[in-house]
Every structure is written in C-alpha cells, then in structure tokens.
C-alpha cells in the first residue's frame, strides 16, 4: 500500500481532532466524508480537502479510493457500521467505547479476524504525550513497582467549552444508545484504560458509586461518581477514578468543559500528570517525585489534540507497515469489560468481579 485513503464516517465535534493525524501524515489522505447531514459532510470535505461527500454509508464503502474508515458515530451504531465496513474490505478505526455490550464486541472482533483487515479501537489518552512519558518513566523503574493509579476528573459548567449539537447530547444521555452514562461509560472508558495502561495487570474487582443528576427535563448526567478497583495477583494494588461535576465552575479548556489529572504511586516514588482535556492547573504537565527530590517536565506537548494527531499517525503507520496498532483488540475488550462492570456495580449496589462478565 503506497497511500492510505481514509473515509470519515460521522462529522460531529470530535472529528475536529480525529482528522489531525490523517491530514498531517504524508502517506494518508482523507478522500471521502459521510454524514446523514449532507451539508455538514460537504463542509467537512471541503475543510479536509476531500473531493467526495456522502450521506449514504454503502456508497462510501463502495468507493475504491477508501482503504480505511474512521467511525465516529453514536455507540448504538458502532456494531452495524463496523461490520459493514469490514464486509466491504475496509480497514477500521473505531472510536471508543467500541460497543455497548461484550456480545456486540465479540461479533465485531470475529468479523475483523475473518476479514483479514486491520481493526482497532481508538482510545486517545494512551497517545497523550504526558501519559506516554509517565508510562516510559514507570517502565524505566522511576517509581519502583507501580501499586496505585488514581484519576480525578473535574467537570464544569454545562455549555462551556465546545458547542455540542442537541442531538449529540440526547443520544449520549440515553443509556440505550450510549451503552451507559455519558460520563462513567463514554468518558470513563478513557479513565478505565488508564488504570490498565499504567498497571498492565488484570482488573479483578470493581465497585462503583454513580449518582444521576437531573439537569433538565429528560436530561440526566451520571455524576458525581466514584469507581474503585483492585488488580489480580499477590501484590496488593488498587485504583480509583472520581468525577465531580461542579456545575458552577468554569474549566479552562478549548474542548469539553472538564479536565483530568492522574496520580501513579509506586513503591519508591510518585508521578503526577496534571492535565489532559483542559488546563485547570498552572503547573507542569508531568511531575516525578523520587528520593526526596521533585523533577518537573516542562517541555512535553500537553494539548489534548496532540493525542489524536499521534493516534491517527499510528493507525496509518500500522497499515503501511503491516503491524498492529498500539491498542490491541484484547486491550479494548478488557477496558470495555471494566466499563460494563462499573455500570453493573452501580446499578446493583455491589462489588462486581470481572469474572462475572466472562461467564
């Protein structure tokens, strides 16, 4: 393959960032755009230099210039859209979370294996440069053995940050179309993956408290929430993710009105990642504590958009080099199971073992 022709399916707000790697890569080109909103598809095609726009997915999948499809549609459509793209012989990059259930995911992965095409679930936090550097430091032994991961998400005023279309808010707030809540299932997929990214061990048990807050008529948000988990193995290791919606607080962000901070404890040190989707703190994006000394990293690119740019480049390189993308299908399944365990735990007010979801 000399060049990767990309078809973008879905032109919502996240497409602002999802396009970046494809636009930059010298051997990739966005050749087609598809969205039910024809005017939006045409506008995006013009913006990205694509000469074709569609409102019908089958027509885009029949386009021989399209080698790979980036799927950015609502979660309840992920399975059908992925199966259609694979059947058409296209490689697939699927926005997280991949599906609403493990059963849907198994059908998708089975189809991907049978097709012989590259299939990845795109989770951008693992490409965020401060997270990548933190992972490197952990692997180099900078904090000893990692024994705890703690993520904190601060959400601010509704309506700040990106302008989100009402129809997008509607499907995200409906557990049937989202698969869970917009916070603890959709955004939560990032945070659950970070729990496994920094401590690459199997998650054993999950306990979740999720409160649903009414925003308006037929509008509910799943937060505040606190999810904790334990890792399998003899060494006691734990993690937690807390999300607080401070609905009167302005969050400095060019994107969603929230920010994420991560703390990794090791047997010999600590790492703090002080921002991600926003910039709440005027602090270095990454700080390491070891042996009584603090080392701040000031030269790491910390704009959230960089994670999308690097993730797009990784997918194109994987296709050109004949290798797997950085996030494997097995990683994606584990993270989905983690997210579903949190949803079940909160719904049933009990601790949930990941083994339950495998049975």
Image (cartoon, rainbow, N blue to C red):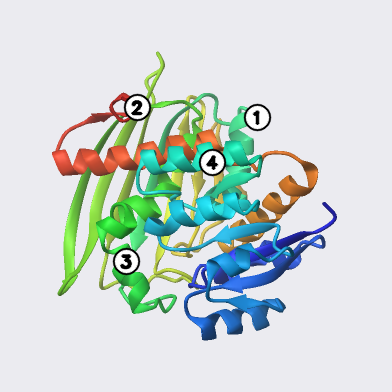
Residue that numbered label 2 is attached to: 358
User: Taking 250 as reference, is 191 above or below it?
Assistant: above
Q: Which mark is residue 171?
A: 3
For label 3, the crowd category at 10 Å Cα-Cα, with few meaning under 14, some 14 to 19 and many 20 or more, is some
Q: Which mark is residue 111?
A: 4
Rounded to the nearest angstrom, the CA distance separating label 3 from label 4 is 26 Å
Q: Nearer the viewer, mark 1 or mark 4?
A: 4
Rounded to the nearest angstrom, the CA distance separating label 3 from label 1 is 43 Å
Q: Are marks 3 and 4 in contact (CB under 8 Å)?
A: no
Q: Nearer the viewer, mark 4 or mark 2?
A: 4
**Residue 207 placed where, x, y %?**
24, 35
Rounded to the nearest angstrom, the CA distance separating label 1 from label 4 is 38 Å
Classify residue 287 as left or right of residue 96.
Answer: right
Q: Farthest top residue?
A: 234
Q: Nearer the viewer, mark 3 or mark 4?
A: 4
Residue that numbered label 1 is attached to: 140
Q: Are marks 3 and 2 in contact (CB under 8 Å)?
A: no
SS state under label 2 = helix
- The disc, 4 or 2, on the residue closer to the chain's N-terminal end is 4
């Amino acid at each position: 393959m000399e060049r990767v022709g990309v078809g973008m399916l879905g032109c919502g707000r996240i497409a602002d960032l999802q396009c970046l790697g494809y636009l930059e890569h010298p051997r990739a080109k966005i050749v087609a755009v598809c969205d039910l909103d024809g005017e939006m598809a045409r506008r995006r095609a013009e913006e990205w230099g694509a000469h074709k726009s569609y409102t019908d997915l089958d027509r885009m999948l029949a386009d021989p210039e399209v080698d790979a499809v980036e799927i950015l549609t609502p979660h309840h459509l992920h399975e059908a859209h992925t199966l259609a793209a694979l059947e058409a012989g296209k490689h697939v990059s699927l926005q997280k979370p991949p599906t609403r259930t493990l059963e849907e995911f198994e059908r998708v992965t089975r189809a991907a294996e049978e097709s012989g095409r590259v299939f990845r679930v795109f989770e951008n936090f693992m490409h965020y440069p401060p997270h990548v550097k933190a992972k490197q430091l952990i692997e180099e032994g900078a904090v000893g053995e990692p024994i705890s991961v703690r993520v904190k998400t601060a959400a601010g005023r509704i309506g700040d940050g990106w302008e989100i279309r009402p129809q997008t808010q509607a499907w995200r707030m409906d557990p049937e179309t989202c698969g869970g809540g917009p916070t603890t299932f959709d955004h939560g997929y990032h945070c659950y993956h970070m729990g496994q990214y920094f401590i690459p061990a199997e998650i054993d048990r999950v306990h979740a408290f999720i409160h649903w807050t009414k925003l308006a008529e037929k509008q509910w948000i799943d937060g505040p929430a606190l999810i904790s988990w334990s890792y399998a193995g003899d060494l006691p290791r734990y993690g937690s993710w807390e999300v607080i919606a401070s609905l009167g607080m302005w969050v400095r962000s060019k994107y969603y009105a929230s920010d994420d901070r991560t703390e990794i404890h090791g047997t010999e040190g600590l790492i703090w990642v002080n921002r991600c989707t926003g910039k709440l703190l005027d602090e270095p994006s990454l700080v390491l504590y070891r042996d009584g000394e603090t080392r701040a990293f000031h030269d790491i690119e910390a704009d959230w958009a960089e994670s999308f740019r690097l993730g797009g480049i990784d997918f194109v390189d994987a296709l050109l080099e004949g290798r797997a993308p950085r996030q494997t299908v097995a990683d994606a399944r584990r993270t989905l199971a983690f997210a579903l365990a949190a949803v079940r735990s909160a719904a049933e007010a009990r601790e949930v073992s990941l083994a339950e979801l495998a049975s």
